[in-house]
Image: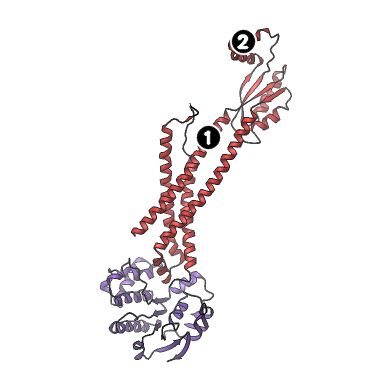
Chain colours: A red, B purple
Amino acid sequence: MMNNRVVHIIGVGTMVVSLLIFGTFLLLFVNLNTWIHGWGHSLSMSVYLQDGIDKKTRDRIASSIRDFPSAEIKRYISKKDALIDLRKALGSEAGLLEGLSRNPLPASFEVGFTDVESPETGPRKIKQVIEKIDGVDEVKYSEEWLQRLEGLMNVVRLVGFIIGGLLSIGVLFIVTNTIKLTIYSRKHEIEIQKLVGATDWFVKAPFLLEGLIQGLFSGAFSLLMLYSCHLFLSAKKMHLLGLTVLDFIFLPTEYVISIFLISVTLGLAGSFIAVGRFLAAESYAEI
Amino acid sequence: MIRIYRLFRNFGPKVALNNLNFRVRKGEFVFVTGPSGAGKTTLLRLIFGAEKPTSGQILINGINLNRISRPKLDLLRRNVGFVFQDFKLLPKRTVFENVALALEVTGEPPSFIQKKTHQTLRLVGLADKEKAFPLQISGGEQQRVAIARAIVRDPLILLADEPTGNLDPELTKDIMVLFRSIHMRGTTVIVATHSRELLEDTAQRTIFLNRGRIVGEK
């Protein structure tokens, strides 16, 4: 009994550690994703209009931009406003503009994005479409910056899949082996149960229940510890290159439920594999 | 009840059972005897489905053990009681729990398990040892717990492997009386033994094995 308790504690402990590594990675992934999205939202595009277009053409261009669900027009900058902005930007050097016979600056729309990743509705596609509209002179945004952003997201996602996959296999392996330890500690009892006519399911049921409980406990413990770590980290302001910037968020509810379900599933699957293998190996070696 | 045709069992180059052919009728009491290594235990293990024959057939109530699925074998075992030479009791369970286990695995209701286990322990004379653990009782008592577990489900067949191997003559006599009373209730009993004393005064059918072959029958 005492041995079994130790084996169970070891089992839950190793599973908690594995899930904690998995959860920590997920937490970092979620936060990184949020931060990158935040930076993505600060990406803006300038749609420069040709001089002398009428209001109808301008409205048509605005409506074409609004057709993209991920794009929002933040501001319309008329030629006059553009000059005022430039004057402000030049400050004491604004006198340079006095010699201009006419305003050379074009009117423009400043466009922001809610989704910078989608190839269908992202800035690259919008640029391609908008540039073809009559009355649009030029569309500019930092393509290089966006490419880096996309590259970073792809790397994070790929690393996420690889680490997540490897950790899941690792957890399954650990659970299978810890349940195997429990099974071996009760080998004699199982053998006798089989000798007196117990069905495989009669033998399996308590181990599956143990796997389920192990999964439930491990899931709950690891989430609790992860939440404690999150509280500790978010209590301090995050600094990046000297700037106080980033909010450290906890996992969304669906991720929390997923970790819990993964934990329970791995507990059950581990037990099922371990006891199934044991019974198959023992089927004709009972006495 | 039990039919055995051209039964062979090899362990590597060693032939443990060599072309056995016999049948045991319903309600019969049969001794299987012979020196150590004659194949007595192997024969019982094969009848119990704990091993597969190298070749040949074993039919129990018309069911061929070669073709039986694992779940069906589990169900068949519920009608076959086995008394092991080394008892195979669970040391951390009481005498009562060891016997009740055979009923628990069949999913019997607790009230029935209680009643039937008490009844069987009375039959084998262990009513006062129900709460003891196997290591707290004598070898003869452990043997009787093993018999109680094998008969608690009223099996059609009772197999016993050297059931008196570790017992003194007085206890041996008691155990044989117990087997005869079980037999009287209609159970087919096969007892494997190398004990000559056990066979001296018996008029029961006896199969003699030597080096895996049947060398005589009484």
Q: Find residue B210 and report its horizontal and vertical position in percent.
A: 45, 87
Q: Find residue B132 and report its horizontal and vertical position in percent.
A: 27, 69
Question: B23 above or below B91?
Answer: below
Instruction: State the CA–CA distance, disc 2 to disc 1.
Output: 40 Å
Query: Is A228 on the left or on the right of A166, as rendered?
Result: left
The amino acid type found where label 2 is placed reads Ala
Give the camera-side residue of B20 and B76: B20
For residue B112, say whether it is visible: no
Residue at screen point 28% across, 75% down: B138
First in residue order: circle 2 vs circle 1: 1
Q: Quadrant of the C terminus of chain A?
A: bottom left
Q: Quadrant of residue B135?
A: bottom left
Name the residue that disc number 2 marks: A94
Question: B145 above or below A241?
Answer: below
Give the chain letter at badge 2.
A
Question: B48 above or below B34?
Answer: above
Give the chain letter at badge 1.
A
Find residue A34 and name its label: 1
Q: Find residue A4 and report its horizontal and vertical position in percent.
A: 37, 58
The amino acid type found where label 1 is placed reads Thr
Q: Find residue B198 and report its horizontal and vertical position in percent.
A: 35, 87
